[in-house]
Amino acid sequence: MKKNELLRSFRPLVFLLFIIFGFIKSNGQNPYPIRSIYTSQFVSSNKLTGPFPNDSCDYVNPFFQDLIYKDTFRIEGYVAFDPRLYGLSVSRKSTFLLQDTISSNWGGIEIMCEPAGTGKTLAQLILETKFYENLKPGNRVRVTGVIRSFRGSSPPTGTRQGNSQLNMIKLSTFSDNSVELLSGVPKQITAKKVRVDSLMIGNDSTTRIQNKLSGEKLEGTYVDIGLVKVRTRQQSANRWFWSVVDLN
């Protein structure tokens, strides 16, 4: 075989190798932008004082601030607690990420491993996203997900805000969407001290009203509510609920 013919015979192979290497390279790159927890949580005051349910974070409502990736992005933060301890459901698992080691306004968000719609079982999604492996208390991590709001049963107009959460997405052909470990050296998290009336106003003899302007900023954060007494305690299936009131 002549030299030129030999070179031509190798071209398809070389081209195929370029495709393979290009695929491997693209598979390791995550295209979604990194946003702060503050950005993913912030809700302007005019929306907080407006009618329910116009309460989604400003990043996605009333329009997407990122027109390319819309409601999907990455966030970085410190893990608040072990998702294995999440006890609200057996069909999904969850933890919270905090922006800093010192809890702050708009500085926390729930991270949800919810298999519905992914074509995966909970066990499969936990394994491939490293949800248990890297989401350990105090670790600093980066998470890829889609912002969602959970409201539960439909409440009366204006009575309640939705809870923001970042839902994990499964791995794709082009990017690794698992939890990235940025630091495996656990950090101590410091709670923000707040009063009951930062969350709710009123008392036992009056109607209690959510203090949305100050309370919504604390959603998903780690707080220390001092000088309280337990008012009620009740159980529903495998869940327990407590309510507390100001000691005074």
Image (tube, rainbow, N blue to C red):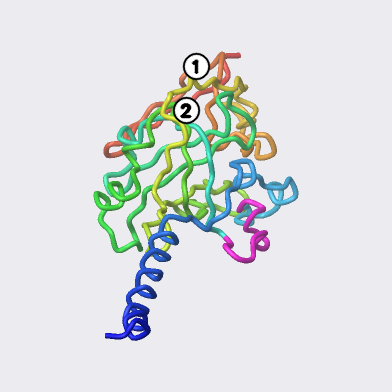
**Left or right side of 147 for 42:** right
Q: Quadrant of residue 9?
A: bottom left
**x and y percentages locating residue 35 in the rendered image:** 60, 47
* In this rendering, position of residue 34 left or right of residue 88: right
Label placed on residue 181: none
**Which residue is disc 2 drawn over?**
243
Mark positioned earlier in the residue sequence (1 or 2): 1
Task: Indicate the secondary structure of the residue bearing disc 2.
Answer: strand
Total marks shown come to: 2
Secondary structure mainly formed by the magenta segment: loop
The x and y percentages for residue 182 are 47, 36
Q: Is residue 209 visible?
A: no
Determine the residue positioned at 43% across, 42% down.
Answer: 180
- Asked if residue 64 is among those painted magenta in the image, a careful observer would answer yes
> In the image, is residue 97 above or below residue 115?
above
78 vs 151: above or below: above
Circle number at residue 229: 1
Say few, some or many: other residues with alpha carbon within 10 Å of mark 2 (under 14 / 14 to 19 / 20 or more). Answer: few
Say which of 27 and 85 sits in front.
Answer: 27
**Residue at x 43% of width, y 23% of height:** 186
